[in-house]
Amino acid sequence: EVQQASYKEQIKALLKRENAVLVAHYYTDPLIQQLAEETGGCVSDSLEMARFGRDHPASTLIVAGVKFMGETAKILSPEKRVLMPTLEATCSLDIGCPIEEFDAFCNQHSDRTVVVYANTSAAVKARADWVVTSSIALQVVEHLHAKGEKILWAPDKHLGSYVQRETGADVLLWDGSCIVHEEFKAKALEDIKKVYPEAGILVHPESPQSIVEMADYVGSTSQIINAAKTLPNKQFIVATDQGIFYKMQQAVPDKELIIAPTAGNGATCRSCGNCPWMAMNAVDNMTEVLESGSNEVFVDPGLAERAMKPLTRMLEFSA
Ligand code: 13P
Ligand code: SF4
């Protein structure tokens, strides 16, 4: 505890010294989220992280999250220095969508509008017409469908098929998935719902269809927290990364939050819903990065220029 307190004071002083601001995702260590709250940074979903980083006047952004979040920040603010506690934190969706194969796929289906999830590399974004996050995927595809456009969607097949079912659009899916959300199991969720029959079920749309179908609410991390506030239930079973419980519990101090189970696990599961890459962000590597200026994020300027267009479109659409 004493050590944690001194880490916090040190990071606060370093943020000032470096004219830096902390941009953190809900899945990171609660200590990092606390630091962001206490220093005028942001804790949010990937869409608002992108907007906050772009609009903040600090000259350095410390992005606590995974690689695509750091790259997005750099693309939207080429003049800022972007540092990350770790450059090793990636995402199974990003890994599962290499640019060469993706480019070939797009070329084979050139009649389709290319919509990619934010959880992708800068190169994949540069090849896209639209970038979306889970908070606006439905609205963007509805908008394109209304104009009669056919969609090529990548990389998350679960989010993509959810969007397809909800909008009725013609959506061709890339075969990618999130290793964390894919582990939630319908049978185990049914079992736990029997233990908590009054609980509302909140689901991130990276989860498989069988989980989404059991949901009382489906949405991005911010939207799920909001749903916990507005839905009347006193208990919620939550199918996303457990890191979200820090802010969610703040928002609903009197409600009980239960992690959705992966196969065979009960309500006490400690390992379910835990992104291994998000977990690589810690106060010690953050301190190190602030002290030394290491782990700077660079994006090829040509790619960045092209990726800026669909990213700006994303922020404008949701403004
Ligand atoms: P959100 O945009 O909902 O925060 O999702 C990002 C993510 O990586 C979820 O796994
Ligand atoms: Fe990627 Fe899944 Fe981790 Fe989110 S939780 S960063 S989608 S691997």
Image (spheres, rainbow, N blue to C red):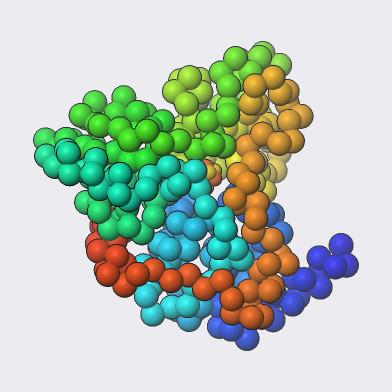
On the image, the x and y values in percent for residue 294 come to 59, 76
Look at the image and tell me whether residue 50 can be seen: yes
Residue that sits furthest to the bottom in the current view: 17
Q: Residue furthest right?
A: 2
Q: Compared to 314, does 258 lie above or below? A: above
- To which quarter of the image does residue 176 belong? top left
Task: Say which quarter of the image contains residue 12.
Answer: bottom right
75 versus 133 height, above or below: below
Q: Is residue 63 left or right of residue 16?
A: left
Image quarter of the C terminus: bottom left
Q: Answer above or below: position of 199 versus 229.
A: above
Residue found 88% across the figure and 67% down from its top:
2
Residue at image point 64% right, 81% down: 292
Q: Nearer the viewer, residue 49 or 63?
A: 63
Residue 312 appearing in the image: no
**Residue 230: percent from left, percent from top:** 53, 37
Q: Is residue 102 above or below residue 64?
A: above
Pick whichever, 72 or 298, lies toward us: 298
Question: Which percent across, then down, holds residue 77?
Answer: 38, 73
What residue sits 39% from the left and 68% below the top? 299
